[in-house]
Amino acid sequence: MPDPLYPFPSIESKWQKFWLENNTFKALEPAEAKNKKKLYVLDMFPYPSGAGLHVGHPEGYTATDIYSRYKRMNGFNVLHPMGWDAFGLPAEQYAIETGTHPAVTTQKNIRVFKKQIQRLGLGYDWDREVDTTDPEYVRWTQWIFLKIYEKGLAYLAEVPVWWCEALGCVLANEEVVDGKSERGGHPVVRRPMRQWMLKITAYADRLLEDLALVDWPDSVKEMQKNWIGRSEGAEVIFKIDGKDSPVFTTRPDTLFGATYLVLSPEHVLVSKITSAQQKNAVEEYQKKSSAKSELERTDLSKEKTGVFTGAYAVNPVNGKKIPVWIADYVLASYGTGAIMAVPAHDQRDYEFAKKFHLEIVEVIAGGDPPKSGADKYSSEEAFTGDGKNVNSGFLDGLSTAEAKKKMIAWLEEKNLGKKTVNYKLRDWLFSRQRYWGEPIPVVHCKKCGIVPLSEKNLPLTLPETKDFKPSGNAEQPLAKIKEWVNTACPKCSSPAERETNTMPQWAGSCWYYLRYIDPKNKKHFVDPAKEKYWMPVDLYVGGAEHAVLHLLYSRFWHKVLYDLGCVSTKEPFTKLVNQGMILGED
């Protein structure tokens, strides 16, 4: 029963109707704003799932609504828009569960979301509403992809990827948590497949350096820094059965203490150097490792496992023969996929050496020196700090910094290595074996190779089909629609085939904040003058769970657009606030 003293339903509906009819929350265009200061307030736009809004949505939306109203009343020209992140796995999974085409369920869900948001009385400028599945929006997402391709930042490669049987598609590294899909918690396995990749690694240093330009929570900055994982060191050439094997190390000063090598189970040399006696054990270990996620493999608390290959390497600094092992704590994706093990000064190497009775040689003074071999090493931990070099030939007596510098100079002089910077960040795996995503606007021609579509032929839209479910065997749903796949090459008119992978759900969200500025422009993805007026976003509110997904990807796309002269700012979001989790852990 409504309260007779304050009839909420009638009062709220009256004013909500008034706000809509009178465009109360409409942002003024730059020419109309006169001397008003601009303020761009942005919420992370939602996936329009079938469940409708959950309580976490209005937690953030209410905060930005209060702030926007306050600033508007203080004379600011406030842009506070809303839209829909409608492509991708969440929408498609819901469509599969209900048996209804994702285009139908998505539009139905958007109507429910919009009605719920309006019932909450939130002050959005609905004239700027965007939907990532709208053909006009898809046009510009594809246009940006082609610009990235023209810049040499998009390429096809056969790479080991995370395949999720339950979702029927490949997942990016960032979408795999503890060996399961981030969405749904389904098991994943490693599998080699042909994939589109975006060269985000080319922007690694700028993505790190420009974090200094933004007012973001330190925790989010730290997550991005750790994900990019920049480390300086040296690449050292070890000989394994006469073959050169480069090894990356951040501690070239400890090279005299390298007593064994460890290769990742996937390393290309493993099959070539493994002895006949060790072949079965090595292959069995490789099989077990392939089922583990990178997080599982690098968990510091887990018991160390490994297998001797039967091969030996030569330490280039002292000529000693040292055994070559494989172990799953070494990742093929980091550095060269091989490490030199210095058990006296690395805890993982130390635990491995103790377990498998491998030699330990102290080369940095400061720990408890070993007497001989792992069994007689008195300390329970490796000494990982800085100190003076010992048992290190020409490095003896030098500090850690001096020893690193001198060893790198020696390696370069002898052509046995070089100074190197390495990153944990991998290129962004950009293609999905799903139906509900933006088609990748290229064709494959036997004569011309990969040929991008011309701008006049955008958008390339999805074909109508009732069979949109993933096959489960890595065949793309689009590959089954031959009348759509078969086409003519735009360059030579020969028979060609369209790309049948689609873009990931992150594509549309990489640039939506720019389309809000000029949502109906058919000539440009955003008018340059309007972009210069509104950008950067002054306040962005959303979850910290997007730290190494959306927030990293959108920064990358923005920097590419900046280099192309399409946007005027180096960073898209000046201030970021994470609203936290309702009933989350303290």
Image (tube, rainbow, N blue to C red):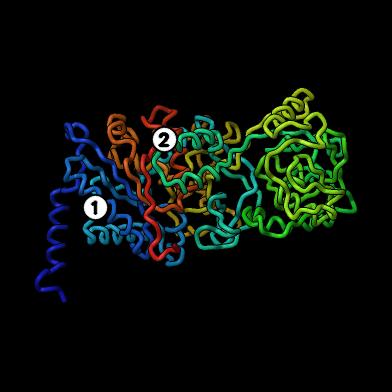
Who's the residue at 17% across and 53% down the image?
A: 20
Q: Quadrant of residue 407?
A: top right
Which one is in front, 175 or 331? 331
The percent position of residue 239, horizontal first and vertical second, equals: 83, 36
Against 512, residue 280 (above or below) is below
Q: How many marks?
A: 2
The percent position of residue 437, horizontal first and vertical second, equals: 45, 50
CA distance for labels 1 and 2: 26 Å
Tell me the quadrant of the picture where the C terminus can be found.
bottom left
Which one is in front, 127 or 442? 127
Disc 1 marks a residue whose amino acid type is Ile
Q: Is residue 239 left or right of residue 51?
A: right
Against 260, residue 532 (above or below) is above
Which residue is under mark 2?
Answer: 213
Which one is in front, 319 or 131? 319
Q: Residue furthest right?
A: 277
Q: Which mark is residue 101?
A: none
| Mark 2 crowd level (few <14, some 14–19, many ≥20, 10 Å Cα) | few
Question: In the rendered image, is residue 139 in sight?
Answer: no
Precedes in sequence: disc 1 or disc 2? 1
Question: In the rendered image, is residue 303 in sight?
Answer: yes
Q: Secondary structure at mark 1?
A: helix
Against 89, residue 313 (above or below) is above
Tell me the quadrant of the picture where the N terminus can be found.
bottom left
Which residue is under mark 1?
Answer: 66
Q: Secondary structure at mark 2?
A: helix
